Amino acid sequence: MLNADALIALVAPENTRDGSDVEPRRLQLVQEAGRPSMERMLSGDLPWVGCHYPTPALAQDAGMTLEQFEEFLYGSVLIDWDAERERMTRIKEQFDAADEVRIVGTGTDLRLSLRGRTGRIDAGGANMPGGEVFFSPVEDSAEGTIEFAEFPGVYAGREVNGIRFRFAAGEIVEASASSNEDFLIETLDTDAGARRLGELGIGCNPGITRHMKNAAFDEKIDGTVHLAIGKGFPELGGTNDSIIHWDIVKDLRQDGRLELDGRVVQSCGEWLT
């Protein structure tokens, strides 16, 4: 990884819960050992592309037959990326021009700042399927509460339901979950940066319409947002450092909204501008 000129990653797990019996502390040591590789990828120094290959394990997690999952996967990848890039560019420009983002939804009222930060469009680039606009928020800006009531957070082979965070001055000061709460807390205590945000992402892929317990797809669901605790993106101005980068998805399609500097720009998953 440190000497490669480029990386092509094909992800085809036989069991998506491999490693779930490993103690969190041992997982953290593995992640720490892999930090130089992760930093090289996140810095943009290493050209890479990664995608999933349909396997029975991924289909089972998604609640589909293998044939259904194949069609779903190809439908999320084989779309008009030029048209999607144009649409996401308009979304990015609105967020680039804003200072404050407010996320409102079930159990959620969270504000964070993008002042001085610009986003990036993923339109079928490194991470396949693409379909998001993402930022590294100002590290000390998150204030309020977010409840991930709709979908579980999946990380390191664990499934954590009912995640709820309260932020103050950018830091998670209260955290709870309805399942695997001990694992959640241990992950947040991995290092100083694990309790701060490294990413705000806006899902935009029209081919992904349902949750699959797979963050590579779920974070792209059109009408959702996701927050990643931990490592930020230096090329987007992010300074938060951590060996953790855990994307957790919030569904806004039922009763949620996004505001930019007090102006509602998305309601129930539909863009208003």
Image: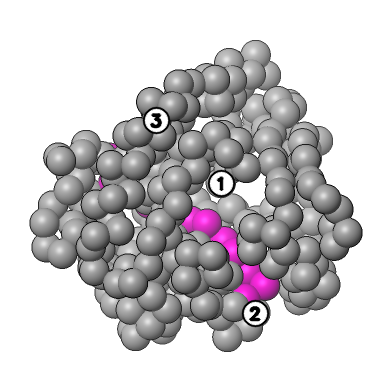
**Is 33 colored magenta in this rendering?**
no
Q: Which residue is mark 2?
A: 190
- Along the horizontal axis of the image, is 22 left or right of 142? right
Q: Give the number of the mark in front: 2 or 3.
A: 3
Element under disc 2: loop
Q: Amino acid at mark 3?
A: Glu
Residue drawn 77% across and 40% down? 8
Residue drawn 79% across and 56% down? 19
- Span of residues in magenta: 242-253
Q: Residue furthest left?
A: 263
Tell me residue 31's x, y (percent). 76, 69
- Along the horizontal axis of the image, is 3 left or right of 53? right
Question: Quick check: 169 above or below 70?
Answer: below
Q: Quadrant of the N terminus?
A: bottom right
Element under disc 1: helix
Q: Is residue 210 visible?
A: no
Q: Which residue is mark 1?
A: 215
Residue drawn 65% across and 14% down? 67
In the image, which disc is placed on residue 84?
3
